[in-house]
Amino acid sequence: MNWTDEHIIEYLEGGLDTDQRKEFENQLMTDPAFKAKYQELEQLLQTIERVPEVEAPAELEWGFKAELDRMQSTLAETRLEPNNSLNASPNRWWLQIAAGFGLLVIGFLSGTQQTSDNSGQLLAMQTQIQSLQQVVMQQTLESSSASERIKAVNQIEQVPFQPDEKLVKMLVKTATQDKSVNVRYAAVQALGNFMDYPSVRNEMVRSLDQQTEPLIQIAMIGLLVDAQEKAAISSIKKLLDNEATTPEVKQQAEIAMDILI
């Protein structure tokens, strides 16, 4: 069985049946990579549960409580909506709430730094929550609706930290293979932040040969030109020589050739 992060959470919460638990535990014993993944997520959840109680400064306390009330209200509304995509995946719902709560805690702890010696704990929490955020975004890209996938792409583009290699690879896969043109376009735009990765540039060059949608072709050409990626010259020339290429794409390709050659 292909065990996901959601299955790990379900196992930790005692939600798997007897046969599934046996299979899960056998995987833990025989697969070092899976065991490491399990331990990382287990530690993350334990960290969230161990968030210490700290006394908020008077100027922060009201805002913290108000935001917590808002999250709880949103949570209740989300679970009541019969067609909400989160209902189909309770553990993803849990991950999203945990990530949101974690960010709330980070903001709260940041406000108490001057009165509490918690800088090391804050740094650890930030690292753990960033990891959780990335798990949520990756899973959303893998199996959600097109609108949710676009939201995840936008979140990746806006995160105030450097996404890990796994998430960047998932973004590349989305940009080159997603069945929705709109999602692919959003992902290509987001990859503009990661064109300093040689693997991203290489994949964009390879994918340009396979793309047939003009919007995606133009977006990819623009990124490759901005990155001064001369390896793209051959792929761009193919577009110029292809009779099926639209005039708009050929115009961009000609401009790109002038710049790159």
Image (cartoon, rainbow, N blue to C red):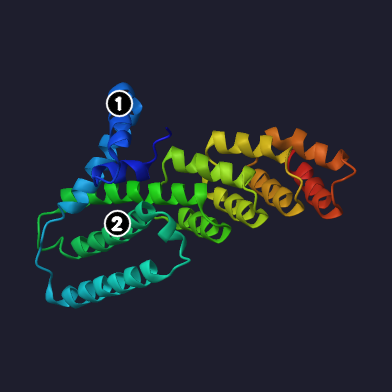
SS of the residue under disc 1: helix
The label number, if any, that marks residue 11 in the structure image: none
The label number, if any, that marks residue 26 in the structure image: 1
Nearer the camera: disc 1 or disc 2: 1
Vertical placement of residue 29 versus 41, above or below: above
Q: CA distance from mark 1 to mark 2?
A: 28 Å
Residue 142 at x, y percent in the picture: 51, 46
What is the crowding at mark 1: few (fewer than 14 residues within 10 Å), some, or many (at least 20)? few
Tally of numbered discs: 2
190 vs 20, nearest the viewer: 20
Residue 93 appears left or right of 259:
left
Vertical placement of residue 151 versus 228, above or below: below
Please give the name of the residue rendered at 60% of the width and 46% of the height, measured from the top-left corner. 175
- Quadrant location of the N terminus in the rendered image: top left
Mark 1 or mark 2: name the one nearer the start of the chain.
1
The type of residue carrying mark 2 is Ala
Residue 231 appears left or right of 44:
right
SS of the residue under disc 2: helix
Please give the name of the residue rendered at 65% of the width and 49% of the height, measured from the top-left corner. 179
Residue 229 in sight here = no
Please give the name of the residue rendered at 76% of the width and 33% of the height, measured from the top-left corner. 234
The type of residue carrying mark 1 is Asn
Q: Which residue is mark 2?
A: 98
What is the crowding at mark 2: few (fewer than 14 residues within 10 Å), some, or many (at least 20)? some
Residue 247 at x, y percent in the picture: 86, 53
Please give the name of the residue rendered at 45% of the width and 47% of the height, measured from the top-left corner. 138
Residue 37 at x, y percent in the picture: 32, 35
203 vs 82, nearest the viewer: 82
Vertical placement of residue 19 versus 251, above or below: above
